[in-house]
Image (cartoon, helix red, strand yellow):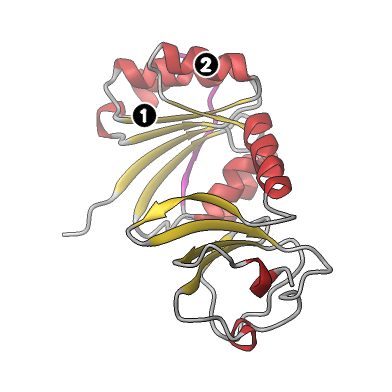
Amino acid sequence: MVNILRILIIGGGAVAEELLSKLDLKKHEVIVVEKDPVRRKDLALKYDVVVIDRDATDVSLYTSDVRMDEIDVVIALTGRNEINLFALAIARMYNIPFRIAKVTDIRIAELLQKLGLGVPISQPSIIASMIASYLDSILEPSKLGKIGDSYIYIVTLAETDKAVERKIADLNLPDDIKIVTIFDGTKIFFPLPDTVLRSGYQLLILSRSSDITRYFKG
């Protein structure tokens, strides 16, 4: 029997729609709470989800409209920190095991963690961390750690790098250097031999060698 996650999403904005586009809605039952009638209609037409017209701060939403005892995950994605925290607090009261909230302030994220309400996704922190990661690995590979006898590296490709605009197969990498995943700024994917490396790609690499710069940077 296939396990199905029952997900309650508070807020039907751009982040919620992006999330819905990435979920396998055949494996999940999703309820979206959204007050804006235009957004509700758009989501209902595009995705196989239940869309509810309610205010997320109305307690009756959780006591009457949604069977909270049947929900596995609550994801709060409104544009207001206080509403997202409120939704997670309600979810915690119902002992919902997985609770996630979008927050726009690191202090709110820290408060959410301190109160044990759930997992905060802080947009400013994520963006800043991603940019810092790019900067740290542009000039030379950034070593993250070690697995067995292999090192884990991140390499960010710049326009002038040797590997840019070349297929992975054409790099003639030794057997002990493997590109595990590629992040292109919007998604992570697994590379193929004919994948062409582009400027801005961030590569996760496993290698037993400590000198991989010459294969990618030149």
> Which of the numbered marks, if any, corresponds to residue 110?
2
In this rendering, the answer to whether 215 lies above or below 22 is below
Residue drawn at the location 50% of the way across and 73% of the way down: 177
Residue placed most toward the observer, 99 or 164 = 164
**Where is residue 208 shown, x and y percent of the image?**
44, 67
> Residue 217 is drawn in which quadrant?
bottom right
Residue closest to the far right: 160
Query: SS class of the residue under badge 1?
Result: loop
The residue lying at 63 percent from left, 59 percent from top is 155
User: In the shown orientation, is residue 138 left or right of residue 47?
Assistant: right
Mark 2, Cα crowd under 10 Å, few <14 / some 14-19 / many 20+, is: some
Which is closer to the viewer, label 1 or label 2?
2
Residue at image position (35%, 62%) is 149
The amino acid type, in three-letter code, at marker 1 is: Val
Report the amino acid beneath label 2. Glu
Q: Which residues are magenta?
A: 49-59
Report the residue marked by disc 1: 66
SS at circle 2: helix
- Give x and y (percent) for residue 60: 41, 16
Give x and y (percent) for residue 88. 43, 21
- Left or right position of 1 against 54: left
Residue in the image at 60% along x and 47% along y: 17
Q: Height in image: 181 above or below 175?
A: above
Answer whether residue 199 is magenta in the image.
no
Visible residue check, residue 2: yes
Precedes in sequence: disc 1 or disc 2: 1
